[in-house]
Image (cartoon, helix red, strand yellow):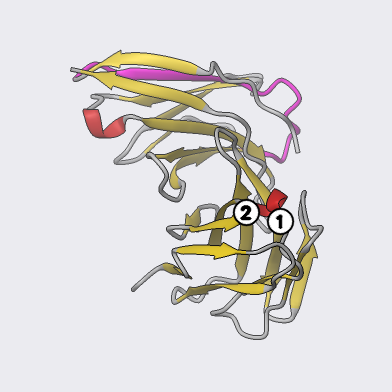
């Protein structure tokens, strides 16, 4: 199993641009989530999904959209990038109690 | 979700046991205690979780006090590769959406 994969690994955007961060898992996990981690800080939950077709907001959802059309994929869309969204983004999936995290996407918004 | 309090940093000698404390005085009856760690800038890694009883796996042991207001993660023989930020989190099992705090930065020294 590849586990949780994220693409791209690095991305630089200009203010106002939009983009989609990809996340996929091959473990048939029901639950998936997106976190962001700012320098020197813990992770903060952006959006999560408890199954295909079901999503909900986390702690910091503003400026982000998600959808869950399949069990495997959970893309995160930045609608209009802002410098405040410069961060490392982690995707995670889980079926039982443990969450499995991807390697992260480092996003810089200029 | 209940909040946790952890010391910001700790040192441990290589080969010795590392004991990482966590206070969670507002934990509710159905909330689990989870431990994750983050090595450098990688995605967080699940270590262990528990509800009431002490737990042990191949990575660590988790000791939860009888009143459940605090817990200790024990790495029995710390190695340099255990240098990381360790997060103690409390939360419900369903959906598994967790709130990460600041964690404890463990430095294992030769």
User: Picture coordinates of residue A90 (x, y %)?
Assistant: 54, 56
Q: Nearer the viewer, residue B59 or B50?
A: B59
User: What is the secondary structure assignment of the residue under circle 1?
Assistant: strand
Position of the C terminus of chain B, as image quadrant, is top left
Kindly check if marks 1 and 2 are in contact, taking CB atoms under 8 A apart as contact: yes
**Residue at 54% in and 62% down:** A12
Position of B15 with respect to A50 (left or right) is left
Position of A69 with respect to A12 (left or right) is right
Residue B66's image quarter?
Answer: top right
Magenta highlight range: B15-32
User: Picture coordinates of residue B5 (x, y %)?
Assistant: 63, 21
Q: Which residue is mark 1?
A: A46
On the question of residue A95 being in view, the answer is no
Q: Which residue is mark 2?
A: A35
Chain letter of the residue beneath label 2 in the structure image: A
**Residue at 77% in and 49% down:** A59
User: Picture coordinates of residue A75 (x, y %)?
Assistant: 62, 74
Q: Nearer the viewer, residue B74 or A11?
A: A11
User: What is the secondary structure assignment of the residue under circle 2?
Assistant: strand
């Amino acid at each position: 199993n590849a586990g949780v994969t994220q693409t791209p690994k690095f991305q630089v955007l200009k203010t106002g641009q939009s983009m989609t961060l990809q996340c996929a898992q091959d473990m048939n996990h029901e639950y998936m989530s997106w976190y962001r981690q700012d320098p020197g800080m813990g992770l903060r939950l952006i959006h999560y999904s408890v199954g295909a077709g079901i999503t909900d907001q986390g702690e910091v959802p503003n400026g982000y959209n998600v959808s869950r059309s399949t069990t495997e994929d959970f893309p995160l869309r930045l609608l209009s990038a802002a410098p405040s969204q410069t961060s490392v983004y982690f995707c995670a999936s889980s079926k039982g109690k443990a969450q499995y995290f991807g390697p992260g996407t480092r996003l810089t918004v200029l | 979700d209940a909040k946790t309090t952890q010391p910001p940093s700790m040192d441990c000698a290589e080969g010795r046991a590392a004991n990482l404390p966590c206070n969670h005085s507002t934990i509710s009856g159905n909330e689990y205690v989870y431990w994750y760690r983050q090595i450098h800038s990688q995605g967080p890694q699940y270590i262990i979780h528990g509800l009431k009883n002490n737990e042990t796996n191949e990575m660590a042991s988790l000791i939860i006090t009888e009143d459940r207001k605090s817990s200790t993660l024990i790495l029995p023989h710390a190695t340099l590769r255990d240098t990381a930020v360790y997060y103690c989190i409390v939360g419900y099992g369903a959906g598994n959406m967790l709130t990460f705090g600041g964690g404890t930065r463990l430095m294992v020294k030769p």
